[in-house]
Image: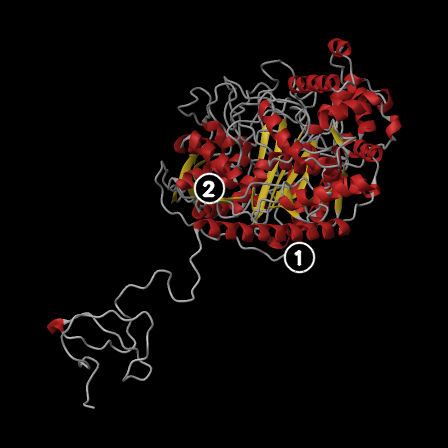
Amino acid sequence: MPPHDETTPVGPAGGPPRRPPAGRTPAAGGAGGRARTNASRSGGSVGSRPGGSRPTGSRPAGGKPGSKKARSTKQRRRRRLKVALGTLLGLFLLLGVFVGVVYATTEVPDPGSVQNSQTTVVYYADGTTEMARLGDTNRTNVGLAEVSEAARDAVLAAENRNFYSDPGISFTGIVRAAWNNLTGGSTQGGSTITQQYVKNAFLTADQTFSRKFQELFLAVKLDNEYSKDEILENYLNTIYFGRGAYGIEAAANTFFGVPAAQLTPQQGAVLAVQIRSPSSYDPEANPEGAQDRWGLVLDAMVEEGWMTQADRDASVYPPVQPRPESSALGIPTGPEGLVVSQAISELEGRGYSDEQIRAGGLRITTTVDKPTQDAALAAVAEVMDGQPDNLRQALVAVDPRTGGVRAYYGGDVGAGDDAIDYAQARRQPGSSMKPYVLATALDQGISVTSRRDGSSPQEFPDRPGLPVRNSGGTSCPACSLVEAMTRSLNTTYYGLAYEVGPENVRETALAATGMPDTWPATGVSSLDDKPTLADPETGSTGSSIGIGQYEMRPIDQATGFATFASGGVRHDAHFVSRVTDTAGAVLLDNGAPAGEQVMSEQVASDTTYALEGVAQYSRRALDDDREVAAKTGTQGIDADDNSDAWMVGYTPSLSTAVWMGSDGYQPIRNDDGAIVYGSGLPGAIWQQFMDTVLDGTPEEDLPDRPVIRGDTGEGVPEPVTEPAAPTTQSAPPTQSAPTTQPAPSTPATPTETVPGPGTPVDPNSGNGGNADPNAPVPPVPNPVPQQPPNGPVTGGTTAPVPPDPGTGQPQQPGQPAPTTQPQPQPVG
């Protein structure tokens, strides 16, 4: 056979095409090939089909021989449905097995453990040392028979009408409750009483799927293992009714002064309303809302046949006893009670309800360190031993790196009628306000080495005829801002505030301290809802902000100075570090908050640099010459006495503010009858506390030179030193020592002198309070550029306007009297 390739014809050419037979036979000349005829190609020849190729003709209907017919759409749909049903059935079987296993393994806790789980515990910063226990002080368990039937009916009407017939859970009830809450319908709750009891007694209030899932299983099993009366009895003994009352017996006594057995239907309805939200429906806090829901509960009782319509129509809202003081709420009565109150307020501000805090079994870890707190209490007690009884003190220590309050003393009474938190008192800061003025000037390019006129007295354009004076006649016509800070010159910093803008100083102080724009309402101060750091009547801020006219709180000063310590980053002061539930699940973790950069690092650094000489100058240097930045402040009450004294200072790891004053604006004098200044008793408390807490800790460096250079403001030239002219006397002629012109005058004694009787006092004059009036001090040398003086000199004194101008009555204890216009004349 001649050779050929796949395209060579193997049969005769020409002739019409032939269809292949229905049954194919092997090809005659190819191993396993299949012979077929092809349609005519070019030239009309019929060639063999290439090996392995498919014929071009159409395939017979029905596909390949022996193959299945394609499924119809209906068949495919049926098949998918069967697969889906099978899968769903399998899932249901698995779910049933899972539910059975979970139900079998779910254990209902002993109801006797309920009281302990509901108790909220407050800890010191170590998380183990207890500070207080809330929720276990006002609770009395009673049997169901000792609760009036009317009160039981009211609770069922408000929370679960079908309690005695339901299986312990109600899925439809949750949906119905959501709809009713939106439309203002029935007062029934979304959960059964059994579910509520399980949630409040054994679980947390978290709105999570896992918690709800666990709640359902516990509720069903509880319903199967206990009778309905037993569940209702436990529920009524554990539910929180507000006002610190746990259980219906305590609630009946707290709200009406009667035992639960004597509750009327109307009184029972009042208590039933409290269950939903004790803080929202307290009759004293929200009388309108409480009475509206009270009426709905009575209507539900009528619907269920538990009250007649005639009794409903005759019902009037029963009188309720006044809300008790905090002493009944488990808050300690000692100084730590004020810490607990602050922690509770902080959690309320974060959205925690009164019920969650007091009856949620929380574990609250505060930022307050036990040894640091003990050091604060010891410093106050030791320094104030034997001092006059009218003196009040506050100490707040803040960690500049986090804002966590490490020590907090606002008074000896932490709860009850006599509790006053002086750490929250709004008092005039005197010269401790001056660092904010300097920070504002630095931000505008005025360096700490810039010189300003500190001579005394001086008049300024915004107060004609009312000159500002420095204490004791101190004068320095060309002091640097560092020197003026150390010597607390009122005229320098009043003038600097005027130069940089009082409103700008206010903004700096608000940013550094985190103070609000307006004072929150407390009900005890005439400053409520008035602008902060501003005149309460006009709302404007004057240059007297530079010397401490406008009120601040000790906690504000501790935070503001902490901002300088942290390089201009403000961390808001806070008391709560961590919150967990009884199982240890973390509900809140403050961690290490990032803070907010409210001033440049250079401004904060140079402000710190300017404050480094004050503590030594005031004879309050720390042990081992530890570097510290500080400022004193004193506020005058009249020509002879002071009303407030401050010492505020910091290292990079601790900022502490100490305030001393009295209830209202009484004169503050020590046991020797001497006037109290910032460097006196407050300075002694501050010094002892700081030395104790920082003892053994690494020393931390503060800036040793200023960063910002130059003076974009209204500086004065540096004094020129000239030799004095020689004098001729009968004795051999001598040359006097050179003097500096102009030479700053200094008092002969280190007292912060106030003018004698009859001299008007200015609430705007500010006060440094640096000098110890009882210690002899050598004369102060001439000023040296960029160096603080080596010896103490006095600052000025600021006197507030006494009683409230609106009422003519003294201010509430711990609260300041507002400043008014016109201002009296300043003093030295």
Mark 2, secondary structure of its residue: loop
Determine whether, in the image, residue 465 is placed left or right of residue 14. Answer: right
The residue singled out by tag 1 in the image is 696
Type of amino acid at the residue the image marks with label 2: Val
Q: Is residue 539 above or below residue 422?
A: above
Q: Name the foreground residue: 487 vs 237.
A: 237
* Residue 443, label in figure: none
Find out whether the residues at labels 1 and 2 contact each other: C-beta distance under 8 Å: no
Q: Is residue 701 visible?
A: yes
Q: Quadrant of residue 162?
A: top right
Which quadrant of the view contains residue 142?
top right
- Most foreground residue, 743 or 693: 693
The disc labelled 1 sits on which kind of residue?
A: Gly
Closest to the camera, between mark 1 and mark 2, is 2
Between the residue at mark 1 and the residue at mark 2, the CA separation in whole angstroms equals 32 Å
Q: Is residue 339 above or below residue 102?
A: above
Percent x, y for residue 564?
Answer: 51, 44
Residue placed furthest toward the left: 43
Q: Position of residue 70 (x, y in %)?
A: 42, 57
Q: Secondary structure at mark 1?
A: loop
Q: In this orientation, which residue lies closer to the viewer: 302 or 211?
A: 302
Where in the figure is residue 567, as x and y percent of width and height?
A: 49, 48
In-image side of 586 versus 132 (left or right): left
In the picture of the structure, the residue carrying the numbered disc 2 is 598
Residue 634, image x, y percentages: 59, 32
Up/down of 583 relative to 342, above or below: below
Instruction: Decide if residue 135 is on the left or right side of residue 450.
Output: right
